[in-house]
Image (cartoon, rainbow, N blue to C red):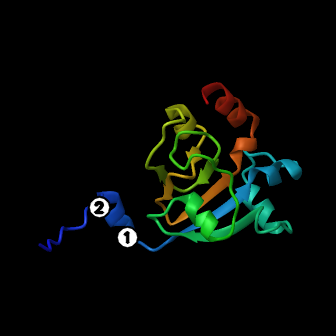
Amino acid sequence: MDIELPAVRSHAESEAEDRPPSTVEYLDYRTIEENGWDLEDDDLFEKAAAADLEKSEYGVIEADRNESLLRTAEENDLKWPFQCRSGSCAMCTAVLKEGEAEMDVNLFLEDEEVEERGMRLTCTCRPRSDEVRIVCGAIRMEYVRDVAQNRG
């Protein structure tokens, strides 16, 4: 017996399907350190755009709103750090600097880290705004490394 079942999707997925891809401007945390920049610099992404950086260090990609930022990075031949792909470790942590991006699953970061520090797990994080600016590779930050060692 052939029975067709309706597709089951969340409201957020249905809404995201109707919207164009997000523009994601990314910057690797290591590049911030190597250039003596500060994560809190207001002109951080402008500095990166003006510098002669490799694609792995800085760039702009389009991200489907139903796709995780990590998967989008991989589809664009970027090698962002990751480990579990399930939102339960800190390896893929990034810092959201502008825009909106929500995690489907977060079993690791505390509310304060998400809300006040802008931390996101890229393996479960999807863009929600038209434009997103994110610092990937935040596992290299002393704070994130400490959190990973003490919670993991």
Identify the image quadrant of residue 69: bottom right
Label 1 element class: helix
> Of label 1 and label 2, which has the lower sequence position?
2
Instruction: Report x, y in % for residue 116.
Output: 57, 37
Residue projecting furthest to the top: 150
For disc 2, the marked residue is 9
Q: Are marks 1 and 2 in contact (CB under 8 Å)?
A: yes
The residue drawn where x is 34% and y is 58% is 12
All told, the count of numbered labels is 2
The residue drawn where x is 77% and y is 67% is 49
Task: Tell me the distance, in whole angstroms, between the alpha carbons under discs 1 and 2.
Answer: 10 Å
Label 2 element class: loop
The quadrant the N terminus occupies is: bottom left
> Is residue 43 visible in the rendered structure shown here?
no
> Is residue 53 visible in the rendered structure shown here?
yes
For disc 1, the marked residue is 17
Q: Identity of the amino acid at label 1?
A: Glu
Residue projecting furthest to the left: 1
Between 96 and 65, the one lying in front of the other is 65
Q: Nearer the viewer, mark 1 or mark 2?
A: 2
Instruction: Report x, y in % for residue 8.
Output: 25, 62
The residue drawn where x is 65% and y is 30% is 147
Instruction: Report x, y in % for residue 82.
Output: 64, 50
Q: Sort mark 2 into few (<14), some (14-19) or many (20+) by Cα contacts within 10 Å.
A: few
